[in-house]
Amino acid sequence: MGATESRAALAGHDWLDAGQREQIERVLATIAADAHAPTTVRDPEQALDVHVLDALVALEIEAVRMARRIVDIGSGAGFPGVALAIALPQTELWLLESQRRKCEFLARLCTTCGVANARVACTRVEEWSAGACNNDVALARALAPQPVVLEYAAPLLRVGGTLVDWRGRRGPEVESASGRAASLLGMRRMEVRQVHPFPGARDRHLHVFVKAGETPARFPRRAGMAHKRPLAG
């Protein structure tokens, strides 16, 4: 995939103006220059594809475009959250991350690049009580097996809220297990959308779930339990 095609994809993005594209370029430059950036993909041309364009594909989902409050679970180096915060300046976007070093990087990144609507919550997802039932959308990208992601997201969403989970190649057994976990959490799968975030991208899907009812009070379980004893495993 050539750099020219990627730049053309960013320049032609339907939901970004010139100022937002310039802001994204600052994000890419900051990641490239920061030796402590928590990602192995720091080259701006590569990061444009695998971080930025891959994040912005979520704007195809109406619930994301219309959200007033979004949480990016396990934000890491800031994707998809920072890119979407730039694209959605009227949206309050929380970058939820448990590792202090990554939280410090996220705070530097947002300050340096002027991403004023993004805030960092440095805590484990199970312990973020301020976010309980308080988000329109939850995002998860390269985070954990889907039943685990569902258990993380459900308690953070309002009823009617949406989870968008980035996945690669589809697998019927995995999706069946995820469906069982979703039903235990008050969640329901709405669609699995194949996406093409950048030229040459293959096997990319956004799994979209809605919170159809209240999540049972026993969730979230204590920290680490979702991984140790996944639902519907």
Image (tube, rainbow, N blue to C red):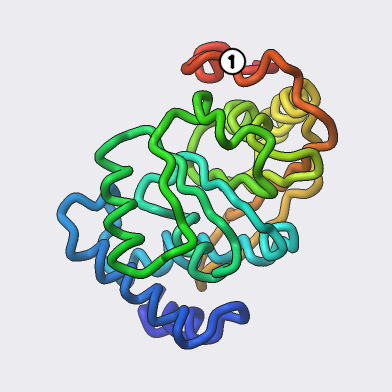
**Are there few (<14), some (14-19), or many (20+) residues within 10 Å of tag 1?**
few
Residue drawn at x 25%, y 40% as measured from the top left: 101
Left or right of 216 in this view: 119: left
Say which amino acid is labelled 1: Arg
Q: Residue furthest front?
A: 130
Q: Position of residue 1 (x, y in %)?
A: 41, 73
Residue 174, above or below 9: above
Q: Secondary structure at mark 1?
A: loop
Q: Is residue 211 left or right of residue 226?
A: right
Q: Which residue position holds label 1?
A: 221
Position of 109 with respect to 34 (left or right) is right
Residue 106 image point, x, y percent: 33, 51
Total marks in image:
1
Relative to 47, say whether 185 is above or below: above
Q: Quadrant of the C terminus?
A: top right
Q: Name the quadrant containing residue 176.
A: top right
Relative to 107, say whether 134 is above or below. Answer: above
Res 27 quadrant in image: bottom left
Q: Can you give x and y, in whole percent of width and height, for residue 192 in the image?
A: 73, 49
Residue 148 picture quarter: top right
Q: Which residue reaches farthest right?
A: 212
Residue under the point 30% across and 43% down: 102
113 or 166, which is in the foreground?
A: 113
Which is more toward the observer, 34 or 4?
A: 34
Residue at (48, 17) in percent of width and height? 223
- x, y percent for residue 22: 39, 81
Q: Residue at x 56, y 80 (%)?
A: 13
